[in-house]
Image (cartoon, coloured by chain):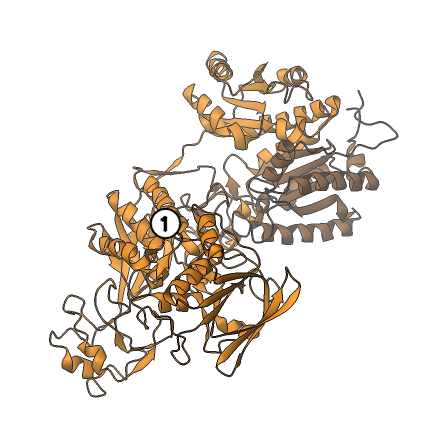
Amino acid sequence: MPTSRIGIFVCHCGLNIERTVDTARVAEALRDYPGVVHVEDYDYMCSDPGQVRIKDAITEHRLTGGVVAACSPAMHEPTFRRAAEEAGLNPYLFEMANIREHCSWVHLDREEATRKAIRITKTLVEKVKGNHPLEPIQIDHTEKCLVIGGGITGIQSALDIADSGFEVLLVEKEPTLGGHMAQLSETFPTLDCSQCILAPKMVEASRHPNIRVLTYSEVLEVSGYIGNYSVKIRRNPTYVDPEKCNLCGECSKVCPEAVPSEFERGLVERKAIFIPFPQAIPSSYTLDENTCLGLHPLRCSECAKVCDVEAIDFDMQPEILEEDVAAIVVATGYELYPVLNMGEYGGGDVPDVIDGLQFERLLSSSGPTGGVVRRPSDGKIPERVVFVQCSGSRDPENHNSHCSKICCMYTAKHALLYRHSVPDSEAIIFYIDVRAGGKGYEEFIQQATEEEKIRYLRGKVARIYREGDKVVVWGSDTISGQRVEIEADLVVLAMAMVPHPSTREISRTLKIGCGEEGFLKEAHPKLRPVESLTAGIYVAGAGQGPKDIPEAVAQGSGAAAKAIALLVQEKLTHSPEVVSIDEDVCGGCGVCVGMCPYGALSLGGAGTAECNEVLCEGCGTCVSACPTGAAQLKNLTDTQVHEMIEVALADV
Amino acid sequence: MSEQTKSVFEPRIVAFLCRWCSYAGADLAGVSRMTYPPNVVPMRVNCSGRVDVGMVLKALEMGADGVLIGGCHPGDCHYVNGNYKTRRRIEVLRNALADTGLNPDRVRLEWISASEGRKFRDTMTEFTERIRELGPSPVAVEAGAHGEG
């Protein structure tokens, strides 16, 4: 039933509107407008007394709708709709006419601005006339959450959600939890041992009664919507029963096949049957089927022969899990931009040019050299190491345009740790700027610069090449303007942080976007940093953009808080301003089905289109395409829009 | 009182602005107190993809001298890809308008993000000036619009 007893509330907003718009005249122009039964203007409609006026008017004049001519609906639409609801009126019968941001603040001529304000207000009166009372759509939801990525961000997210009493599936592609943090030696600026602070978290996640850890697993498919996602996960076979494996390591010793170790960043090899590092979770060996000679007892099976506990099972099959979850946290993390892409720095052909994570392994006491810094080519302890910041970062022409944020800090850490480890050594750092925004970060950089044998050289490195057993670094010092040529024993490139290679694929699977650099896109860069544009899917950690551990952990907790806020609700609500189909008019052409980006429309049994209101986001793209007018957006129908256009252009 | 004088033609323009980008860009222009001509009456739609040919034609028929559609930049649509559909739809419409003898410049599609208050101001100013140059829409004149204000 169209609304016909409409109240108009014109706000002065102090002088914000009143200065340029004659509010009394706006009110007067609407007084005798068809359908309007009450008009008033007031200093501040959003104030408590202003809202009381609105509520009183609704009761007194038995209003069936209202227009508040004031600021942007982005500002106070919820305020006035709540006031209407409190007075017993359906909130969807109240609209705002924006005569401040779109009128009084942008025009100088009072006469012109007043006319425009009248026009704008009338368009909203026409809209309200066609509005229907609506009820938010209620959605049931499951009580489980999926966290994709088992690095520190994903672990933190999973723990926070699980501690709130909800079940979590923690999916990690690699055979162990931990992510890149497990590879780090010590962490800036406090220099605490990375493994020592990470391992307890990994153990906690694996033992938590509400967390199911699925390592060596991948998310294959995701469908559904907020509160009700269906996910398909593949658990790849590890061919080792983690319940039986006692970590004796005999299998690895006898295994004849070896490939570069991923965990050790290729500095050493691992066997086909391996454990990435001793503290790995789950604590079990994994048989990599791509490296193994063949999963057949006749081909090799040396490992199975020596396994006393009979943990090895060549017949293990991939397992497909189908789960329903309410929310998804995406924490897919980062990878380093490959040194191979840096032709100017040897492109991976110079063995003693390594990336930052390789250097972490050389510094780590659990690393391949036992914490003694030895260069890869000949195992010599380097006496002079050159560090190159911004390798592959801040170079939009050749590589990546973004700043990787953490390299200034970890390069300072590398130089300090190296200097402490090799007493007579010299560290030279090439930098463009030193960016040390963070608690205790600047102080840490100061500590590094005060070291006598750490030299900060402002400039860019143009070329790196091998000469004899030295690595020559050729660049310029932009402060002195001199060309610089340094013979180093080892060069460490602070490679750009880029999204993990799986990010693009996972963003497609989840239908959430990626930004230009390929990082996961947040709903709003400032106000909604952990939400994706898809309701119920959250983003966190270095997959969303370069960040350090404290930021990644904070974001992991933030995403968890968002997921928990959703999980604790008894029912989820969804805007009812969605599409409806008039079955009597619909010809069943199906054009709308192809237009909908959410898969909300389908052709039903009767041959006419059907809209799943839960999936519909209310964009109205299908409405524009519908050739018969059967598809209409609730409370913004073609008829309403046409009425609005008429008054927008009519004389005032 | 007359809304126009004989010497200066004041065009009537409607703008369909998507809620997430262009409407918010208009809000930002307001918050930043940027000034532009008052000829444009804005209308909020959820997505520029909601703007159909019928709406634009209705506006022209009712006497609009110009119609502006504001959407999110390509790739930034809040509803995934509604703006791409609008782009195609409006281009077809502009070609059809040209065939009827109406200057297609009277219908303009612009990508204005929520952070582009300045672009919103500039677009409103330029578009109003362009329509002023083109003069009253022949459809509007025939329909008897631009009478006494």
In the image, residue A392 sits, relative to residue A538, either above or below, namely below
Q: Is A360 displayed left or right of A210 in the figure?
A: right
Amino acid residing under circle 1: Val
Residue B148: percent from left, percent from top:
79, 24
Of all chains, the one bearing label 1 is: A
Residue A649: percent from left, percent from top:
70, 31
Front residue of A176 and A234: A176
* Residue wearing tag 1: A553
The residue depicted at 79 percent of the width and 20 percent of the height is B1
Q: Is A66 displayed left or right of A607 in the figure?
A: right
Q: Is label 1 in a helix, a strand or a loop? A: helix
In the image, residue A43 sits, relative to residue B87, either above or below, namely above
Front residue of A596 and A113: A113
Which of the 4 image quarters holds residue A366? bottom left
Q: In this view of the protein, can residue B105 be seen by the observer?
A: yes
Determine the colour of chain B.
brown
Q: Quadrant of the C terminus of chain A?
A: top right
